[in-house]
Amino acid sequence: MSSAHSRRPLTPRGRTGLVDIVSGSFGAGHDVAAEAIAEQLRSRGFSTRTWDVVDLMPGPLGRMLRSGYLKQIQSMPATWRWTLGAIEGHDAILRSIVCALHTTEAALLEIAADRPDHFVSTHPFPSQALGHLRASGRTTVPVTTYLTDMSVHRLWVHPGVDTHLAVHQIPADQARRLGAGETRVVNPAVRGSFGTTVRSEFGQRAARRALGLPQDRRHLALVTGGSHGIGQLLESARDLAATGLVTPVVLCGTNTRLLAKVDRDPSMIGLGWVEDVPRALEAVDVVVQNSGGMTSLETRATAVPMVTYRCIAGHGETNAAALAESGIAPWAHDTTQLFQHLLGALHVRPLWSERSWPSTDVVDALFPVPSLIA
């Protein structure tokens, strides 16, 4: 994945501004964050190029790693907790992973030869490779890591990275404890369309009509596990239906097997791949999610109440804990708590929707001095 845009503004150094964004297609969340950052930069007149770290690895290595990760998450999700624990607790395992990531350095140096003004990473793999290039003095291009989640593991942090950007103080503090240098809290990078949704009865009816959802007054709960429909979404939907408070709408994404199972159950509604996610959020009354990734940030941007339930092992659990600690989304550990948190979500406006979030966005953090000339 690579995209280039020709308009380049003047920077304080007197030359045109180019930002290279490096993501990783291990699930859609990192790519969506990269797209949102690119959108913000282009709106300020910068030129951007977006790269997938999978394509920067030699031969089939990147594709094999991606395939292995997706199979592990889909078929043996509980083992992901063990994997992250091994990375956190064993330096030898961390070193072996980092060594494999050094294979991307030749491609990254080729990109750096175009003299971009900045590298931005939205995935731990390019963060490690770029951090090593900076620490070894092999590139002078500043590197910023955008931390996409509410919790941070060791692979996210490299001391050679110039700045780590966090979406909340909780992950910012975690990154500092793991050895990050300059760390700043910024407004989460989500596409602008999420900020334009209308939380009104009219807007909800229009959104439901567009998606073929019920037009009556029943409460709808969007059940989501990311773009691949990962986790115990069917079980979550059954528990939600059993509360009698909501009709579950399961966002299955690319998981066609899950969609087929949902379609056979009259107590719930299934949606496949949805391009217009802001419209889906506008159509429902509450979101029930299990990973705390990009969907949680997009939900927050649209001010839809949110509950975490049956979260996936590993980063899903650490994200759930951080979301609960921050007050953004309660974590329901059983059906009794699920009922209680649903009642609160449906009848009490969440406090976090009223808060003023940081005014600093990713572009402000990358280029704190105004760099555009009218």
Image: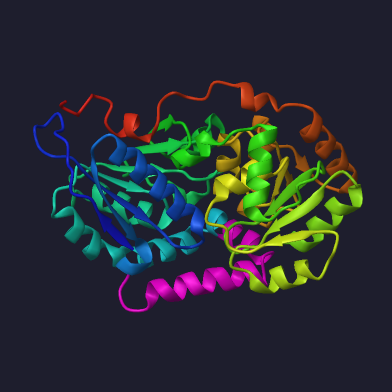
Check the image and report above or below for 124 versus 307: below
Q: Residue at x 33, y 34 (%)?
A: 363
Identify the residue at image location x=49%, y=45%.
Answer: 148
Q: Residue furthest left?
A: 14
Q: Quadrant of residue 81?
A: bottom right
Q: Is residue 224 visible?
A: yes
Find out whether residue 312 is within the magenta segment.
Answer: no
361 sits to left or right of 335: left
46 up-or-down from 350: above or below: below
Q: Main secondary structure of the magenta part?
A: helix
Percent position of residue 26, x then y: 48, 63
Number of numbered tags placed on the structure image:
0
**Of the pair 203 and 49, the residue shown nearer to us:** 203
Quick one: quadrant of the N terminus?
A: bottom left
Question: Residue 194: image x %, image y %?
Answer: 52, 39
Q: Nearer the viewer, residue 170 or 15?
A: 15
Query: In the shown orientation, is residue 350 left or right of residue 332?
Result: left
Which quadrant holds residue 125?
Answer: bottom left
**Which residue is located at x 81 percent, y 51 percent?**
247
Looking at the rendered image, the quarter that the C terminus falls into is top left
Query: Which of the pair 344/182 is nearer the observer?
Result: 344
The magenta span reads 57-86
* Residue 159 seen in the current view: no
Which color scheme does this rendered protein use? rainbow
Residue at the bottom extreme, as displayed:
60
x%, y% of residue 319? Answer: 62, 45
Residue 341 percent coordinates (x, y): 81, 37
Image position of 303 with respect to 76: above or below: above
Residue 84 located within the stretch drawn in magenta: yes
